[in-house]
Amino acid sequence: MATKSKNPMVATTAGAIAGGIETLTIWPMEMIKTNLQLGTMRAQYTGMLGGFRYHVQTDGVGSLYRGLAPVLVGSIPKAGIRFGVFDFIKQRLADEDGKTSAVRNLVAGMMAGAIEATVATTPIETLKTKLIGANAGVWEGTKMILKKEGIRGIYQGLSATILKQSTNQGLRFMWFSEFQRRVSPEFLERHGFIHDAQNLTGSQRASLSLIGGMTAGIFSVFGNNPFDVVKTRMQGLHAHKYKSTLDCFRQMLLHEGVLSFYSGVVPRLGRVIPGQGVIFMSYDSITMAVSRYIER
């Protein structure tokens, strides 16, 4: 399972590379999910498959990657910060045997998510949401936002993003760490799934990380989708309708009902499940490779 290196640069480097791989893999689904949450394309499509079909037929395959550039550039340091901070805090919360409980992993993940949200996620996500909503190019859209709203326009919805990202990463890291502990190589050997717990093959290791990441994604989506929807609203082109994050929650509950907090949950699952599988599998594999290189 995941390599436990004492060098924080291993986690940071592996996380950064894994973040880039994840973004390239799932961006089309993220773009369609954001449109569904904003409601900007409601007349054109109402689901993930309809979104793919509409964009490809109308503007070609390239339209599925609209707004990717700033997110791809940002996803690399963003994921590096997330995994690096989590690894750093987790080591300091560990007991004398180097072990951490589910609660400590949750705390470490939430702190990593909060730092990631403040340093990188908020400006990146705000640009992503507004560029998709405005149907504009990267530089043209960025200049338009800065001219119209100033630097505050890029840091819009900071509190909502911290709330969303801290719960998101806390739940994911807690689940994945528990999955590693409970579905250990020894457990699999004991139940006849593998023959040698001490010598996992590369494909066996990758499969375990993939499954652990995918199930962590499912757990986190149902746990924090309301925060994700509110964050998207607070960073959209119509964010001026809400006085604060709390006001956004209140207005949605009063005017749209509880189910509005779970809008886009199916397409989000469609993106998060493979995305988290890819990032945790990539992180695990890269961590091992980087560790071997450093230890030479």
Image (cartoon, helix red, strand yellow):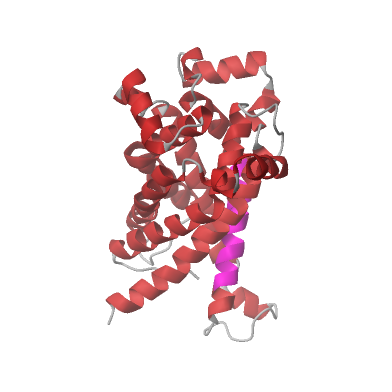
Toward the viewer: 164 or 147?
A: 147
The answer to whether residue 177 of the structure is visible from this angle is no
Q: Is residue 18 above or below residue 219?
A: below
Q: Does the magenta stretch include residue 216?
A: yes
Relative to 17, is 230 on the left or the right? Answer: right
Toward the viewer: 33 or 134?
A: 134
Residue extent of the magenta highlight: 206-221
| Whole-percent x, y for residue 279 in the image | 50, 58
| Whole-percent x, y for residue 104 in the image | 44, 51
Instruction: Please report the residue visible at 46 percent of the width from the left and 45 percent of the height from the top.
Output: 68
| Whole-percent x, y for residue 294 in the image | 28, 75
Q: In this view, does 170 lie above or below 127?
A: below
Specify the quadrant that holds the C terminus. bottom left
Instruction: Please report the residue visible at 61 percent of the width from the left and 39 percent of the height from the top.
Output: 32
Relative to 159, is 188 on the left or the right? Answer: right
The answer to whether residue 119 of the structure is visible from this angle is yes
